[in-house]
Amino acid sequence: MINNVGDFLKSHEIKPSYQRVKIYEYLMESKEHPTVEVIYSALHPEIPTLSKTTVYNTLKVFIEKGIAMAITIDENEVRFDAEVNMHGHFKCLECQKVFDFDVETLDIGNDAMDGFQVVEQQLFFYGLCNHCNHES
Amino acid sequence: MINNVGDFLKSHEIKPSYQRVKIYEYLMESKEHPTVEVIYSALHPEIPTLSKTTVYNTLKVFIEKGIAMAITIDENEVRFDAEVNMHGHFKCLECQKVFDFDVETLDIGNDAMDGFQVVEQQLFFYGLCNHCNHES
DNA sequence: GTATCTGCAAAACATTTGCAATTCT
DNA sequence: AGAATTGCAAATGTTTTGCAGATAC
C-alpha cells in the first residue's frame, strides 16, 4: 500500500495537486471500479469546487503515466482502477457490481500472436456473482 | 458459413425483415468488427430509408437471440461481431484496427471463481499489430 | 512571471425513447 | 385488421473542447 500519495505521484512525473491526490486516494481505496460520475459525486462534498472536467483530465494523466487503467466492461460508461497489475474483472448481470479476480497465468493455448506486441490485457467475465447466483 | 440468412434468422426466432437480413449479412461478412456508424454508412447507399435506430434495434435483437455479441474494446463506441464462439480480440493502438485471435483454452490458473456463474467471456489485448510493429 | 492546472459553459458524439407511419400476414 | 417493425425527431447521458481565471514554482 502507498503511504504518501504525493510522493507516489511525483515519482511518476505527476504534479501532486490537491485534486489529483484526492482522486488517486479515492481510486486506490475504492474497490468498486468507479466511474467518473461516482468519483465526482464522492469527492464533491469534500471539494465543492471540483469539476467533472478535472476528474476526466486527472484520470487521463493517471492512465498516460501508467498508474491507473480504464475498464470498458460496461457498454455505456468507463470505469477506472488503480490496480494496474494483471487481474480479471467479473461483472454481475444482476446486481451490476464489478469484482476483481486473480489471474495467475493467462494461457490461451496457442501461438497465434506472432508479430503482435501486446502492451495491455483485459479479461472480462459476465454472469451471476456468488450472492445473486444463490438467490435465484 | 450460413447460406440462407433468412432461414438462419427464423431458426433463432427472429423475423427476417429486409433490414435485418442485410444487417446480419454485413455483420457476418465484415471482419472489421463494425460500429453502428460503420454498419449504417455501409448499408445506407443500398437502403436509403435505413435509420440508425433500426441498426440499434436490430443489433439488440441479435444479441438477445444469441447470434451476435457486443465488443466493448473501445472506450467510446461499441463494436459488434457475428462470431459468437470463444475468441479473443486484439486492438492495435496505432492503426486502431481490431483483429480476432484464437483462444483454444482459457486457463487463468486458479479457482477464484467459486460460486460465480460465468455466462460470457471477453478477452481484449491492446498493443501493436504485426504491420505497425514492424514499421516503427 | 510564466507554466500548468482547474473549472465553467458549450459542443460533440453515441445511444435511447416516444410515437406515427409503414409493412407483413 | 392486428401485431410487429421501421424511422424520424427529440431527449438523454457521457466525454471532449475552448477558454478564462486560479494556482504553483
Image: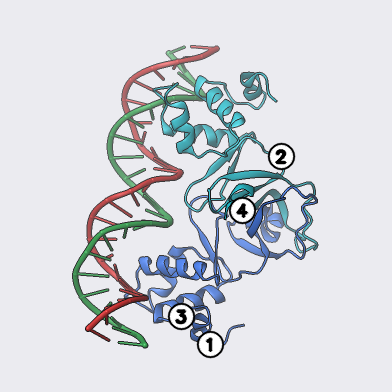
Chain colours: A blue, B cyan, C red, D green
Dot placed on the residue nearer the N-terminal end, 1 or 3: 1
Q: Mark 2 belongs to which amino acid? A: Asn
* Residues tagged 4 and 2 counted as in contact (Cβ below 8 A): no
Between marks 4 and 2 in the image, the one whose residue lies nearer the viewer: 4
Dot placed on the residue nearer the N-terminal end, 4 or 2: 2
**Quick one: SS at disc 1?**
loop
Instruction: Specify whether disc 1 shares its chain with disc 3.
Output: yes
- Picture coordinates of residue D22, whole percent (x, y): 25, 80
The residue singled out by tag 1 in the image is: A4
Between marks 1 and 4 in the image, the one whose residue lies nearer the viewer: 4
**Quick one: SS at disc 3?**
helix
Label 1 and label 4: CA atoms lie apart by 38 Å
Label at residue B133 = 4
Report the chain holding disc 3.
Answer: A
Label at residue B85 = 2
How many numbered marks have been drawn onto this rendered protein structure? 4
Report the chain holding disc 1.
Answer: A
- State the quadrant of the N terminus of chain A: bottom right
Label 2 and label 3: CA atoms lie apart by 43 Å
Q: Looking at the image, can residue B125 be seen?
A: yes
**Quick one: SS at disc 2?**
loop
The residue singled out by tag 3 in the image is: A21
Q: Mark 1 belongs to which amino acid? A: Asn
- Picture coordinates of residue A93, whole percent (x, y): 61, 52
